[in-house]
Image (cartoon, rainbow, N blue to C red):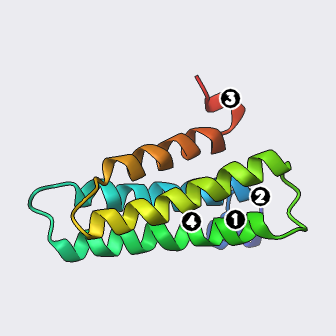
C-alpha cells in the first residue's frame, strides 16, 4: 500500500451507518422516554417534567399530523390507532401538568411504540 493510500485511509471519514425512518423514530421515542423517566424522580424539578412533557407532546403532534395526511401510506386502521394514541398522550399530559395524572402511562405508551419500531430480529 502506498503512503498516499495509507494517508487517505487514515484521514478518510468513516461511513455513517444507514439510518432508516424507523430507527430515527425509535431514537426520538427513546430520547423523550428517557426524559419522562428522569422526570419521575422525586428530586427532579417541575421544569424538567414540563420540558419532558412538552418534548413528548411535540413528538406525538408530529405523528398525528403525519397520519392525518391522506397521502400517508400506513393502513387506515394503524393510522387511526396512532392518532388515538396522540390524543391520549395530549390529554394525559394535561392531566399530569394539572396534578391529576401520572407520567408512567405516557412512558408505557412510548415503550410499546418503541417495541413496534424495533427491527424484527431484535424482537423477542
Q: Position of residue 28 (x, y in %)?
A: 54, 62
In the picture, residue 11 is in which quadrant? Answer: bottom right
Q: Position of residue 25 (x, y in %)?
A: 62, 58
Which residue is tagged 3?
121
Label 2 near label 1: C-beta < 8 Å?
Answer: yes
Position of the N terminus by quadrant:
bottom right
Q: Nearer the viewer, residue 43 or 91?
A: 91
User: Which label belongs to residue 60?
Assistant: 4
Instruction: Compute the Cα span from label 1 to label 4.
Output: 43 Å
Q: Residues within 10 Å of mark 3 (few under 14, many from 20)?
A: few
The CA span between labels 1 and 3 is 33 Å
**Mark 1 Cα-neighbour bin, 10 Å: few <14, some 14–19, many ≥20:** few
- Which residue does the image show at 33% across and 75% down from the upper left? 51
Give me the C-alpha separation between circle 1 and circle 2.
10 Å
Sequence-first tag of 2 and 3: 2
Residue occupying the point 62% across, 55% down = 84
Give the numbered dot on residue 1: 2
Residue 71 appears left or right of 101? right
Q: Earlier in the sequence, mark 4 or mark 2?
A: 2
Which residue sits at x=38%, y=65%?
Answer: 93
Taking 20 as reference, is 124 above or below it?
above
- Where residue 117 appears, as percent x and y from the top left, is 64, 45
- Choose mark 2 or mark 3, whichever is in front: 3
Rate crowding at label 4 as few (under 14), some (14 to 19) or many (20 or more) other CA atoms within 10 Å. Answer: many
| Residue denoted by label 1 | 9
Q: Earlier in the sequence, mark 1 or mark 2?
A: 2
Instruction: Specify which label sits upstream in the sequence, 1 or 3.
Output: 1
Amino acid at each position: 500500500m502506498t503512503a498516499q493510500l495509507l494517508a487517505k485511509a487514515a484521514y478518510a471519514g468513516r461511513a455513517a451507518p444507514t439510518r432508516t425512518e424507523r430507527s430515527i423514530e425509535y431514537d426520538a421515542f427513546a430520547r423523550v422516554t428517557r426524559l419522562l423517566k428522569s422526570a419521575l424522580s422525586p428530586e427532579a424539578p417541575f421544569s424538567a417534567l414540563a420540558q419532558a412533557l412538552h418534548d413528548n407532546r411535540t413528538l406525538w403532534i408530529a405523528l398525528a399530523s403525519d397520519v392525518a395526511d391522506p397521502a400517508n401510506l400506513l393502513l387506515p386502521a394503524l393510522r387511526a390507532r396512532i392518532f388515538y394514541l396522540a390524543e391520549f398522550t395530549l390529554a394525559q399530559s394535561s392531566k399530569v401538568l394539572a396534578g391529576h395524572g401520572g407520567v408512567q402511562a405516557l412512558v408505557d405508551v412510548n415503550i410499546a411504540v418503541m417495541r413496534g419500531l424495533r427491527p424484527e430480529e431484535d424482537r423477542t
